[in-house]
Image: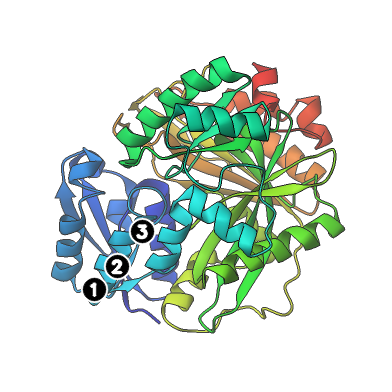
Amino acid sequence: MIESLLVANRGEIARRVIRTAKRLGVRAIAVYSEADADLPFVTEADEAVLIGPPNPAQSYRNVEAILAAAKSTGAQAIHPGYGFLSENAEFARTVEASGLIWVGPGADAISAMGDKINARNLMAAAGVPVAPGTTDPAADLAAAVAAAAEIGYPVMVKAAAGGGGMGMGVAVDEAALRTEYDKVRAFAERMFGDGSVLIERYFPRVRHVEVQILGLADGRVVALGERECSVQRRNQKLVEESPSPAVSPELRSRLLAAAVRAGEAVGYRNAGTVECLLDPTSGEFFFLEMNTRLQVEHPVTEYVYGIDLVEEQLRVASGLAPTFDPDALTPSGHAIEMRINAEDPKRFLPGPGVIRTWVEPTGEGVRVDSGYTGGNTVTPFYDSLLAKLIVTGDSRDEVIARARDAVAGFQIVGPKNNLPFFAELLENDEFLSGAYDTAIVSRMR
C-alpha cells in the first residue's frame, strides 16, 4: 500500500480522502490556499502545505506548487479528488514523470475521454450506444447548421472539451442554433482553451443515469451499479440516488455491460463514471461522457455495494487486489445524496458568507461529508458545495422518510443554502413516485 499521499484538492473531497488514508495508516498531506487555512481538511491532515493565494490558478491548479509540496513532504502519491486538475492528462503525466504515483486513470484514458467527439467515436466503435450527432467538430456555423438539419431539431450544442454540465446549449431551430453556437464556442475557448463544438440530438424528456466503473490492477474493469442523477439545475446535479428507480433488472444488465465495454475500450484503471442519457419511454440509453475521476456522488455507490471507493482507488494505484470479489458483486439497500450548497434555494445563485451556526444531523442511515464547520468563511473563489448529506436504508421509502428528518435537522446559519429546496423536493409527488426526469427542478420553479 502507498505509504504517503498528497491530496491535491480542498474542502469536502480532500477531507474525505484524508479520512480513508488515515484509516489505512497512510500519511495524509494536504495543500491549501490562503483562503482555506481554517478549513477542517487542513487541520485533519498529518501535514499541510500552503501553496498560494485564493485564485485557483495560483494554488489548486498550480502544478509547480503542488509538485514542490509533494517533494518537500516526501509524498509518494497524489490523489487529485474531483475538479481542478483531476482530469488534466498533462498533470497526470507530469506527476508520474516526477516519480510519483498518480491515483487515477492513466493519462491516455483521460486524454481520450476528455474530447467529447473523440469519446463518442471511441464508444461507438466499442459497441456502446451513442446519440445521433457529429463525428467531427462543427468547424463553423454553416457546418453546425448542416449537421443539425441532418440530425433533426432540437439539438444540443456542446463544447467538445467540456464536462461537468458546462459549455452546453439547446437549439430548437436554426435561429436558436446560430445564437447557441457562438455562445458555446466562446465559452469553450475561454474556459477550456478549445473552441471545438459538437452537435447532438437533444431529448426534451430524458433521465440522467450513470454507471460507476473501477479498473482493477489486474486489468479487469468492473461495474458497481448505476446512479440516478436527474435532479439538476442548469445541468448541474443536486441529488443522486442508487439504485435508479427507472432502471429494471434487464436495463441494468445492459447499462452495466456497456459501461464495462467503455472502460475496456480505453484500458481504464482506477475509478471512473460512464454517464448516459436514458429515454424513459423507450428504455433506450445513450453514452453522454466518461468522467475520468472520482465523482462527487460516489458515497451512494459505497453504501449500496458496501465498499470504500477511495480505499479501492489507493489499492489499484498500489497494484493491489480489491477488497471485494469482482465476481460476486451484490448490491443491497438504497441511498440518496443531496448536495448542500451555499446558494439561494429558489434561483440557485451563490451566497458566500461566515457560518455562524453549523449543526449536522445524526441518526441511523445518516452520513455527512462536509467541507466546513461553524466559524468558517465560505468564500466566492470556489464551488459552492458545503457538504453532502447521504441517507441510506433498506428501501427508497425508508430513505426518503429519514432524509426528511435529516434535512430538518441540518442547521446552517450564515451563508444562504439550499436546504429548503430539499425539504420541498422530498414532498414533491413527482420525485416521490420515482418517475421524474431532468426537468423536474424547472417544473418546481
Name the quadrant of the C terminus.
top right
Q: How far apart in space, not on screen, are marks 3 and 2 (Cα)?
A: 13 Å
Q: Nearer the viewer, mark 3 or mark 1?
A: 1
**Display coloring:** rainbow
Q: Under tag 2, what secondary structure?
A: helix
Vertical position of residue 48 compared to residue 286: above or below:
below
Q: Quadrant of residue 245?
A: top right
Q: Secondary structure at mark 1?
A: helix
Sequence order check, earlier mark of 3 and 2: 3
Number of residues whose C-alpha sits closer than 10 Å to that of mark 3, classed few (under 14), some (14–19) or many (20 or more): many
The amino acid pointed to by label 3 is: Pro
Residue 421 coordinates in the image, percent (x, y):
61, 24
Mark 3 or 2, closer to the camera: 2
Q: Amino acid at mark 2?
A: Arg
Q: Which residue matches tag 2? A: 93
Q: Which residue is mark 1?
A: 97
C-beta proximity under 8 Å, tags 3 and 1: no
The answer to whether the residue labelled 3 contacts the one labelled 2, judged by CB atoms less than 8 Å apart, is no
The amino acid beneath tag 1 is Ala
Residue 282: x, y in percent?
A: 85, 42
Location of residue 320 in the rendering, given as x and y in whole percent from the top left corner: 49, 84
* Viewer-closest of 100 and 354: 100
In the displayed structure, does residue 148 sit left or right of residue 356? right
Residue appearing at x 36%, y 74% in the figure: 26
Say which quarter of the image contains residue 216.
Answer: bottom right
Q: What is the crowding at mark 2: few (fewer than 14 residues within 10 Å), some, or many (at least 20)?
A: some
Could you tell me which quadrant the N terminus lies in? bottom left
The residue sitting at 39% across, 41% down in the picture is: 372
309 relative to 359, above or below: below
Q: Are marks 2 and 1 in contact (CB under 8 Å)?
A: yes
Q: State the mark number for residue 80.
A: 3
